[in-house]
Every structure is written in structure tokens, then in C-alpha cells.
Image (cartoon, grey):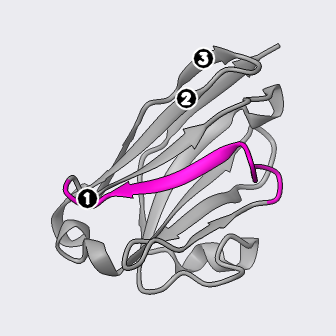
Amino acid sequence: QVQLVESGGGSVLAGGSLRLSCATSGYLYSIYSRNCMAWFRQAPGKEREGVAAIYTGHGSTYYADSVKGRFTISQDDDKRTVYLQLNSLKPEDTAMYYCAALGGYCYSGILAQRSQNRFDYWGQGTQVTVSS
């Protein structure tokens, strides 16, 4: 059963913007207000890295240093959907972006490599390509 569906990826020029969406369904929809939801990305030949996370219970957010000030994670409780606004995009932001969720709190360090296995649910990914 599909639990997370991403959308919104595409191709843009450097400096452009995109908004990614991650819609929940099924079990994740039912426990939406108690999820830590995050965005990860993986570029070809590189490890998957954490980008941003939000605890849907009270909206606390976490960001990777590489995207602070450019990306914003947010939530729409009515739609039970999480968004990632990508501004001032750079070619190095090119990657497949994945939404992930775990039933529980986010915490400092949730975006670290060692924390990825805590996420129980993953979407299929949406491609972001930034050209110079």
C-alpha cells in the first residue's frame, strides 16, 4: 500500500525555484500529526543525504547546512501533506528527492546518515535537475 507520494520535481535554471509535495495515505495519513517527515536527496554516485525534516505534531523543523536559507519545509494539516520549497537552486542541488516518514519525534541529528534507517516509509522519489 502506497503511503507517501512525491510530486513537483522538474528541470530549472540555476537561481530558480520548485516546490515539492509529499502526500500521505493509509496508515501514515491516520497518524499524520505524530510523524517526523523528512526530505532526502541522492545524486548519481553519491550517498543519500538528509535535506530537511519537520515534526507534524508542532511544526519544529530541521535543515541541512547546505540548504539553510534556501529551502523551506512546511506542512498542510488539512491535506496531510508536507512541502519542500526550493529557492535559489544551484546545479549541485540536482538529485532525486525522496520523502520519508517515521512514526515519532524528529530530533537534532535526524538528518544524519546514521538516522536514515529509522525511517519506516519512503516515497518513490521525484527528480530535480538544475542547469547552469
Above or below 63: residue 128: above
Q: x, y percentage for residue 73?
A: 53, 54
Residue at the image point whose x is 41% and y is 52% from the top? 123
Give the secondary structure at mark 2: strand
Q: Which mark, residue 11?
A: 3
Q: Which mark is residue 80?
A: 1
Amino acid residing under circle 1: Arg
**Earlier residue among tags 1 and 2:** 2
Mark 3 vs mark 2, foreground winner is 2
Q: Quadrant of the N terminus?
A: bottom left
Q: Nearer the viewer, residue 63 or 41?
A: 63
Which sits in the foreground, 17 or 121?
Answer: 17
Distance from the alpha carbon under mark 1 to that under mark 2: 20 Å
- In the image, the segment drawn in magenta is 65-78
Percent of width and height locating residue 52: 62, 59
Mark toward the start of the polypeptide (3 vs 2) = 3
Q: Residue at x 25, y 59 (%)?
A: 80
Reading the image, the residue beneath label 2 is 18
Cα separation between marks 1 and 3:
26 Å
Residue at horizontal 27%, vertical 59%? 3
| Residue 68 sits inside the magenta stretch | yes
Q: Residue 126's x, y, as percent?
A: 49, 36
